[in-house]
Amino acid sequence: MPKKVDHDERRAHIAEAVLRIAGRDGLDAATLRDVATEAGMSLGAVQYYVRSKEEMLRHAFAHLGERVTARIMAGIDAEPVTVRNFLVSMATEMLPLDPRRRAERRAWQAFVVRGGEVPELAEALREGRSWLLGKVAELIAEGRRTGDVPPELDPWHESVALLAVIEGLSADLMLGLREPEATLATVRYHVRRILP
């Protein structure tokens, strides 16, 4: 009896190989051939799932977003779901606090740089960023409705500011300018400012 192949699992395996290469060596090193080697697959098998490097990169980018989102949701499953817990969990998963998240941050940065050259990837980056900004603004607006967020705070501007704080802290961590605990303390401070 022929072995049954899980196509979603294979696509995820290819995306993980792309992310490992991108996090280690940058996206230029993520050729179809090198991804096949990294994934332990033949080039033909990789090409069965992705027809071009650009399609492979778009798929890997989407996979990265799904992976981080799943970890954010898992982080709040352990606690009561509140706006504060969600925002802290989101920041914690987006910050490069350990080797795995540093590799993801390097891959993310490589995708952003590549997005300047590839319109389809740039569009996916914009859509992902807009979704995240909107989701955070929606949560902050919900906090305003329940009285947890001061009424004078604008949800959209607070969303933009929080994500800018995360980006800036990420750069500091990548450069070795901040320690993880001090970084998390800054995130908690900022979130307490929004949700006193």
Image (spheres, rainbow, N blue to C red):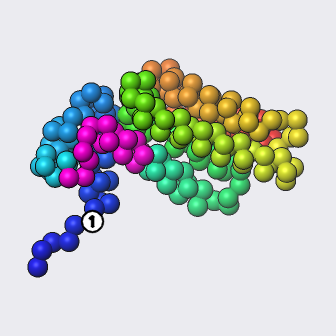
Quadrant (top left, top right, bottom left, bottom right) of the N terminus: bottom left
Type of residue at label 1?
A: Asp
On the picture, is 121 further left or further right than 1?
Answer: right
Residue plotted at (85% across, 51% down): 145
Give the camera-side residue of 118 and 7: 118
Give the camera-side residue of 29 and 165: 29
The magenta segment is 48-64
- Compared to residue 85, the image places residue 123 above or below, namely above
Residue plotted at (78% across, 51% down): 142
On the picture, is 54 further left or further right than 73?
Answer: left
From this viewpoint, is residue 185 visible? no
What count of labels does the image hold?
Answer: 1
On the picture, is 104 further left or further right than 159?
Answer: left
Callout 1: few (<14), some (14-19), or many (20+) C-alpha neighbours within 10 Å? few
From this viewpoint, is residue 171 visible? yes
Residue plotted at (49% across, 54% down): 70
**Residue 62: in magenta span:** yes
On the picture, is 109 further left or further right than 185?
Answer: left
Residue to which mark 1 is pinned:
6
Residue plotted at (20% across, 39% down): 32
Query: Does the magenta stretch mainly form a helix, a strand or a loop?
Result: helix
Which residue lies most toward the bottom here?
Answer: 1
Give the camera-side residue of 86 and 78: 86
- Residue 80 coordinates in the image, percent (x, y): 68, 61
Quadrant (top left, top right, bottom left, bottom right) of the C terminus: top right
- Residue 60 coordinates in the image, percent (x, y): 35, 44
